[in-house]
Image: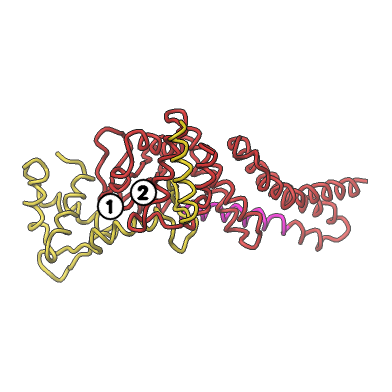
Amino acid sequence: MMTASLLAVAGALGALAAVLAAPVPIALARSDWPTRAPARALLLWQAIALAGGLSMIGSLVAAGFALVPFDAIVGGIVFGAAIALAGYLLGHLAVTIVVIARSRRRHRALLDLLTAPHPTRAGTVILEDSAALAYCLPRGGRSLTVLSRGLLDRLGHDELAAVIAHERAHLEQRHDIVLVAFRAWHSALPWFPIAHRAADEVAVLVELLADDRARRVSSDHVLARAIVAVATVDVDGIARVSRHPAAPRGRDRVLRLVG
Amino acid sequence: MANLGQLERAVMQTLWDADGALSAYDVLPRVSAVDGGKKLAATTVLTVLARLEKKGLVRADRRARPHHYLPTASRADHVAELLHEALGDGADRHAVLERFVGGVSAADAAVLRDLLDRRTETG
C-alpha cells in the first residue's frame, strides 16, 4: 500500500519534471506576451527551473523509498542518484558564484585604477576610451555603472540619462543574481538545450525590465534613440555584432519602444 | 591624506609613465605631488606597491637594492582587458557584466535608423 502510493508520487513528480523540462519552457520561449510583461515572465522562468529541478530530485527520492523494501541495492542506487544530482546542481551553482565573484573583483580593481568618477553622478565612473560602451558591475553596496568616453561623446544628455537609468535598474533589481543562477544551470547541463534557451531568454527579459525602468525617466523615443546609437556604432567604436545572448534582441527592444 | 585607492592610482600612473623599473624612492616624489604636495612616507609607498603586487598589477625585481617595480601590463593593455570583458566576447560567452546593448547587423542597423527617422518626422 505504502509502496504503491510512493511509486505513484514518484511517477507524478517524474511526469511533472518531464513537462517542465521541455514542453513548458518551449511554449514560454515561443510566446510573445513576455515582451509585454517581462517581470511576470522572469518569475515564471525561475519557477519552472526551480520546480523542474525539485520534481526531478523528488521523483528519484520517492522511487528510492518505494524500492528499498524490495531491493535495497537498487533502492540505494536510486537514492544515490537523487543525492548526486542535487549535489551536482548545487555544487555547480557554488562554483559559478565563486568564479564570477573572482573575475568581478579583478575587474573592479582595474576599474579603480583606470576610471575617473563621473563629476555629478554617484556610483558612475568614466573609462577613457573611444569605444561606445555602457555596462554595470554589481558588487554588494559598491556597485558601479561604467560609461566610456566614446559613449559620452555620442549621446545627448537625455539619451545618457536613459542609459544610466537602464544600468541602475540592473543593479537595483539585482538582475545579476537571476542571471548567475541560470548561467550555472546552463553550464551544469550543457547538453540540455532548454537550459541554454532559458539562460538566453532570461538575459533578454532583464534587458526589457531595465528598459521599462528607464522609460519612467525617459520617453520611449529617447531610449530607443540611445539603444540605436550604441548598437549601430561603426567598427572603431566596437559595437560589432556581439555574441552576448541578449545582443541580437537589440532590434526587438527598439521595435517594442517605437514600432 | 589621499585614500589607498587614490594612492594606488597615482603609483600605477607613475609606473606607467616611467621608462623603466622604479624603486619606492623614485616613485615617492611624483606621488607626493599628486597627493596635494603633502609629504608621504616611503613605507606608505612600499605598502601601496606591495598591495599592487598582490593584485598582480606590478612585478618586483628583488635582485635590485632597493627593490625595483615594473607594471605587469601597460595601461592600454588593461583598458583592452576591461573592454574585452565588458563586450563579453571572450571564450566565456557568459560574461560577468551586463552591457547596455550589443551590436546589431548592418541590415538591422539600417532598419532601426530608418524607423527612428520616420518616428521623428511624424512625432
Seen at 37% across and 58% down, the residue is B84
Seen at 73% across and 47% down, the residue is A24
User: Which range of residues does the magenta coloring cover?
Assistant: A80-100
Secondary structure of the residue carrying tag 2 is loop
Residue type at the position of mark 2: Leu
Chain B image colour: yellow
Pointer 1 chain: A
The local crowd at label 2, few if under 14, some if 14 to 19, many if 20 or more residues have their Cα within 10 Å, is many
Q: Position of residue A215 (x, y in %)?
A: 47, 31
Residue assigned mark 1: A129
Pointer 2 chain: A
- A219 to A93, vertically: above or below: above
Q: Position of residue A251 (x, y in %)?
A: 51, 47
Q: Is residue B89 magenta?
A: no
- Give the left or right position of residue B2, taking residue A117 as reference: left
Secondary structure of the residue carrying tag 1 is loop
In front here: A181 or A153? Answer: A153
Q: Are marks 1 and 2 in contact (CB under 8 Å)?
A: yes
| Residue sticking out furthest to the top | A216
Q: Position of residue A156 (x, y in %)?
A: 32, 37
Chain A image colour: red
- A90 to B73, vertically: above or below: above
- The figure's colour scheme reads by chain
- Quadrant position of residue B21: bottom left
Same chain, marks 1 and 2? yes
Residue assigned mark 2: A133
| Residue sticking out furthest to the bottom | B63
Residue type at the position of mark 1: Asp
Q: Is residue A89 magenta?
A: yes
- Quadrant position of residue B80: bottom left
In front here: A175 or B33? Answer: A175
